[in-house]
Image: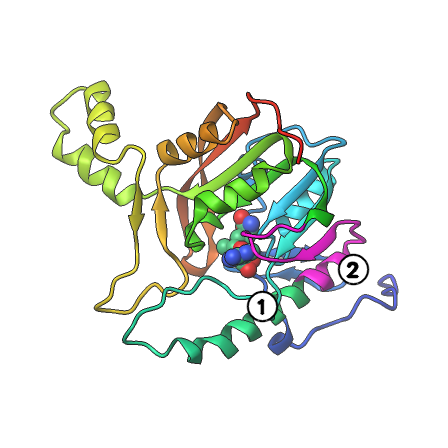
Amino acid sequence: MSAPQPANHPAQINPDDYYFYHTIDLPGLGEMKGEWDLRAFADDYIGHVDLRDKRVLEVGAANGFLSFHMEKKGASVISYDLSPDLDWDMVPYAHKDGAAWSPMRKNHLRKLNNAYHLSHSLLNSKAQLVHGTVYAIPESVGLVDVSTFGSILLHVRDPFLALQQAARITRETIVITEILDNNRQKIINSLFSWLSTGTVRKIRHKLLGPSMIFRPITSIGHPEETWWHLTPELLEQFLSVLGFGDIKISYHKQFFAEHNATKLMYTLVANRTVPRQPA
Ligand SMILES: C[S@@+](CC[C@H](N)C(=O)[O-])C[C@H]1O[C@@H](n2cnc3c(N)ncnc32)[C@H](O)[C@@H]1O
């Protein structure tokens, strides 16, 4: 005989009301499939930072898989994300009707927030969800030991301002994970394959180096919600300007379930080297 389900564990949910960005296992519901499945390599994604007894701010938590994962690692987590009342930085293509996106975006955020709340409840999480934009993290969040930016800086028009906002309230460490623009790397690698690996790395650094590549393509009006390919070297410079100069970069693959493919990503773990200025 199977164990009775506690009353707050629904047997099924209406898919029109929930959006799972991350695949997540939920008691009573099983596996909820999302765009990304980070379950196998979640520790790589968060840079293996020791989170025991740390106060952590996850900027852009979506349906919360990483917040709940970090909580399991001993962190006390504040999950931060937009609500339907707040604006996503859409790319304002002049030839497209930007206003038409707004209801769709609001509905998406409503479903994403619902998925967070449902997961939070079924996992008995103590994480706190705070709504706001990256550009105005409220004072009420207080100071945190660690802030994480997983796959969000590519979606915001001003990634430096976003980081600056979190840096002012972060005591120890900022973790950033982004997708690697592997295509450009591959082109450079193949063009210069006759040179030594060290020389190719130097060329790659000179050509891509600390740069942000603008992704919107006017002719196809796509992407609408993604702005940049940010190189690890650029983020290293941003972070050191902000006083987080002790930086380690690692590379890992994550499963992009939507395309049934793995994607190469990188994670920067940046520790404070300049003391925080009191507000
Ligand atoms: C691609 S998801 C990343 C989720 C998770 N951090 C991860 O690494 O898998 C980006 C998240 O950032 C949020 N987001 C996008 N723009 C934002 C903004 N301007 N302010 C706050 N959150 C934002 C989105 O709602 C979404 O949940």
Labelled disc at residue 121: 2
Q: What SS does tag 1 mark?
A: helix
Q: Amino acid at mark 1?
A: Leu
Circle 1 sits on which residue?
109
Q: Is residue 67 above or below residue 170?
A: below
Q: Which residues are magenta?
A: 116-138
Looking at the rendered image, the disc whose residue lies closer to the viewer, 2 or 1, is 1
The image shows residue 90 at horizontal and vertical percentages of: 42, 65
Q: Is residue 232 above or below residue 57?
A: above
The quadrant where residue 106 appears: bottom right
Pick whichever of labels 2 and 1 is earlier in the sequence.
1
Q: Is mark 1 within 8 Å of ligand 1?
A: yes
Is residue 253 visible in this depiction of the protein?
yes
Q: Residues within 10 Å of mark 2 (few under 14, many from 20)?
A: some
The image shows residue 40 at horizontal and vertical percentages of: 56, 42
Labels 2 and 1 touching (C-beta < 8 A): no
Residue at the image position 67 percent from the left and 31 percent from the top: 278
Q: What SS does tag 2 mark?
A: helix
Q: Nearer the viewer, residue 228 or 254?
A: 228
Q: Nearer the viewer, residue 97 or 204?
A: 97
Residue at the image position 24 percent from the left and 42 percent from the top: 184
Confirm whether the magenta stretch covers residue 126. yes
Residue lying furthest front in this view? 279
Q: Is residue 22 above or below residue 252?
A: below
Is residue 37 visible in this depiction of the protein?
no
Figure quadrant of the N terminus: bottom right
Count of numbered labels shown in the rendering? 2
The image shows residue 274 at horizontal and vertical percentages of: 56, 22
- Whether residue 229 sits left or right of residue 34 in the image: it is left
Confirm whether the magenta stretch covers residue 177. no
Q: Nearer the viewer, residue 164 or 114?
A: 164
Work out how far the residue at label 2 is from the one at label 1, CA to CA, in angstroms: 18 Å
